[in-house]
Image (cartoon, rainbow, N blue to C red):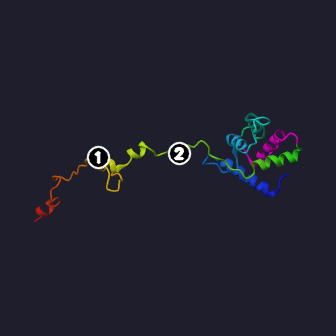
Amino acid sequence: MAENADLASLEESFKKFAIYGDTKATGNEMTGKNWAKLCKECKVIDGKTVTGTDVDIVFSKVKAKTARVITYEEFKKALEELSAKRFKGKGKDEAYDSICKLVAGKEPVSSGVTKAAAVGAVERLTDTTKYTGSHKERFDESGKGKGKGGRENLVENTGYVASYKNAGTYDAKVKK
């Protein structure tokens, strides 16, 4: 069988793939989706001897009847099942070691993630120094937005005219 260092890195790979894409996952159980991702990214699926269908069948075979996930022990059984198919010319232990080496130390990769690009028109349209007229009033000198105060004329319901200098002094005058 594989050495202790290989088993430790194999278990580490299991945990990394088990928690991938699920914020509530503990790393003790792996879903079928993550199992398929592991097999694809670690080159267990080669398209000839082992296909995506084989991976799904092995997952269904090793998991408990009503379960939707596999544990680390079931994961090792699944690798053992696939190793015989993936490395046909080798012995059982040698094939298992080979498949463990494919998986050990690997971690999931996020592929196809789109990054936002701020080029051309986007930069020009979001540059607040170039705004004119009433739109310019929505931003302060640093270019930061004023929020609702910049979009609407806020009314003060104090009972005084807008720029009255002695606002709030009526009560003091009446009490004399």
Instruction: Give coordinates of residue 88: x percent, y percent.
Output: 86, 39
Prevalent SS, magenta region: helix
Q: Read off the magenta span.
A: 68-89
Q: Which residue is mark 1?
A: 132
The amino acid at mark 2 is: Lys
Q: Which residue is mark 2?
A: 115
Quadrant in the rendering for residue 82:
top right
Q: Is residue 172 left or right of residue 95?
A: left
The amino acid at mark 1 is: Thr
Residue at (26, 46) in percent of width and height? 133
Sooner in the amino-acid sequence: mark 1 or mark 2 = 2
Q: Which mark is residue 56?
A: none
Q: Circle 2 — which element?
A: loop
Q: Is residue 23 left or right of residue 91?
A: left
Q: Depth check: 96 or 75 in front? A: 96
* Residue 109 part of the magenta-drawn span: no
Q: Is residue 166 above or below residue 37?
A: below
